[in-house]
Amino acid sequence: MNVSFSQVENVPLYNQVYEFLNRMNVKGILQQYSNTILPISRKEVGEMLKEIASTRDQLSIIDKSYLDKFEREFANELGIVEQHSVLFTGEQSLSEKMNKSFSDREKYLYEYQDSNATMYVEFLGSIENRMKKVTNTKSVSTQLLQYGGRIRGTYKNRLGYSMQTTNGTQYGNKPFALEDPKLKTNYKLNEPNSNNFDFTEGYLRADLDWLNIQFGSEFQSVGTGYSDKLILSDNAPVFDALKIDAKYKSVKFLYLHGITGRRVFTDVFYDDEQVEYSINRYFAFHRVQFSLTNFFNIGLSEMVIYQLSSPEFSYLNPFSFYKSGEHSRGDLDNSLIALDIEVFPLVNYKLYATFLIDDIDFQKIGTGWWGNEVAWQFGVLKTNLFNFESFDGIVEYTRIEPFVYSHHKSGNSYTYKEQNLGPHLQPNSDELFLQVNYRSSEKLRAWFLFASERHGENILNNFGQLIKNVGGNILEGHRRYDSDKTKFLAGNLRKTTRFQLKAIYEPITNYFVEAMYEFRNENLTWLSQKINSNYFSMQIRIEY
C-alpha cells in the first residue's frame, strides 16, 4: 500500500542533502534558504526540492543527477510513487530483493505505511581503519567496528519520531582512538580494560504547522561557518533538550533548553557521615532570524550555561533576556550573545560572518583588558569556482580572543564533557581555512582543505601545573590573581598547518566508501621543535 504524505521527523545533520540545498541557494535557484540552523524536517526538505525541481531546466547535468538522487530519497515527501528496496517483506522473491539491494533505490530493512502512520527501519554499520605516523616514531593504528540501527516515522502528519543507536568495538591502539573527540568523551570506551563504545540519539517532534515542539537528543548546529560553528557545533556529545522552533514568513525562532552534565559533591557532617549531593549543568539558548528579501539573512542568538539542582525559570522562558536573568542571579552564570549574517551579493557568491560576545566593556576596548572576550568569523563561498560546474570554494577566517567561552566559576565553561559546544579551536587562537569541494557526479564527492592555526597555550610547569594563565584553555577561566591585561597569542605559541584530502564514493545508494589523508605540521615555537604527522583513514559504511 503506497500512502504518500510528508514526514515531520528531522533529516540527520550529516545528510548530504544539506550540501545540495546550500549550493542551490548560493546559485540563486533556492530562495530564502539558510544553513545556519540545522537539522530541518523531511517535510521542509521536500518543499525545497519541489522548488528546485520547478527550475530543472536551469540546472547543470551534475545538479540534475543530485536532484534525481534526492527525489528518490524523499519520494514520500514529494508525492512520488517510489518502490523502495525493503529486505523484510513477503511481497518479493529473494532474487528481486537481491537485485534491488544493489540498485539505486532507497533501502530499508523494514517499511510500514498506512493512512495514519509510517515507520522505517534501517541498519547502520561501518568498519574503519585509522593510521597515524609521527616524526621519528612508529606508526600506530586503530580499527573501529560499529553496528546498530535507526527507527523513524510519522503519526497522523503531526508527530515525528526517531531513535538511533549503535554499538562499537575498538581494536588496536586505544590512546590513538581516544584522540577522536567523539570517542574521547564516551563513557564505555574510557573504562579500564574496555574496548567497547556506544552512541544513541532519539526524540519526539510535534509539527503544529508554524510551531514545532521537540524533546530528546539530536546533533544540531547553529552558525554560519564551514570549518566550524562559533555558536553550536557537533564537537561536543549530543545532549537531551527541549526544543521549540517556529517560522512565520521570513522570521524564524529557535529555543533550546537542555542538560549538559551533573556535578557530584561530598560533604562530611559533624558525625563523620558522608553525604553526596549533586547539581545539574544546564544550557539555555534562543535565537531569532530574519530573511530580508533573497539578499540578506540576519540572526541574533543568546545562550547561557548555569548550574542548579533544578532549571531556572528565567531561563525556561523562551522570550526573556538571559543577560538580565544572569544579573538577577548575581552574575554567577556564563552568558553569551552572537550576531550572524549571510549576504548574497551576486549569483554564485555568499558572504557570511558571525560575531560572538562572551563579555565586553566598551570603555576598555583597545586597552588589553582580559574581560573583552569576543570571537568572530567571516568568509566567502563561491560556487562554480573558476567557471567549473563541479567545483566550489570557501575562504574563511576565525579568531577567538583569550578567555572566550571559559568562566571564572568552575563548571560554567561553554562545554559539555570538556568539549566546546562551539568550535574545535581553543580560546586565544585563530585559523585561516581554505577548502575546495569537488562533485563529479551524484556518486562521488571530494574535498581538499588547507588550514593554518595559531594558538597561545597556557604556560605549565614540568608537572603539568598552571604557571601563567593567558586565556588559552576553555576549562581555565580568569582567576582574581591573574593579570588584568592579555595579549592575543601570548603564552606558548603553537602553529599548526594542515592539508587534507577527503573523498566519499557511493557506488550503490546507501553503500559508502570514505577515505581521508591529512598531513599536519605542528611548530612548538617555545621549544623550537617541529612535529610532522600523517593521518590516513578508510571506512566502509552501510545504511540499509
Image (cartoon, helix red, strand yellow):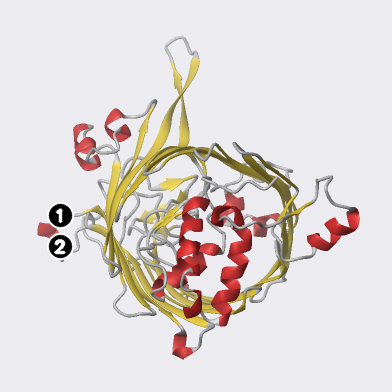
Q: Position of residue 3 (x, y in %)?
A: 63, 46
Identify the disc placed on residue 430: none
Q: Residues within 10 Å of mark 1 (few under 14, many from 20)?
A: few
What amino acid is at disc 1?
Asp
Q: Which residue is mark 1?
A: 361
In the foreground, 48 or 447: 48
Q: Secondary structure at mark 2?
A: loop
Q: CA–CA distance between discs 1 and 2?
A: 7 Å
Point 57% across, 79% down: residue:
62
Rendered position, 403 above or below 149: below
Left or right of 88: which side holds 278? left
Q: Is residue 443 visible?
A: yes
Quarter of the image for the N terminus: give it.
top right
Q: Is residue 164 visible?
A: no
Q: Position of residue 486 (x, y in %)?
A: 25, 62
Rendered position, 539 above or below 204: below
What amino acid is at disc 2?
Ile
Tell me whether circle 1 and circle 2 mark residues in contact (CB < 8 Å): yes
For residue 15, what is the image quadrant? bottom right
Q: Residues within 10 Å of mark 2 (few under 14, many from 20)?
A: few
Identify the disc placed on residue 365: 2
Q: Position of residue 110 (x, y in %)?
A: 74, 45
Quarter of the image for the C terminus: give it.
bottom right
Q: Position of residue 186 (x, y in %)?
A: 61, 45
Point 21% across, 60% down: residue:
485
Rendered position, 211 above or below 432: above
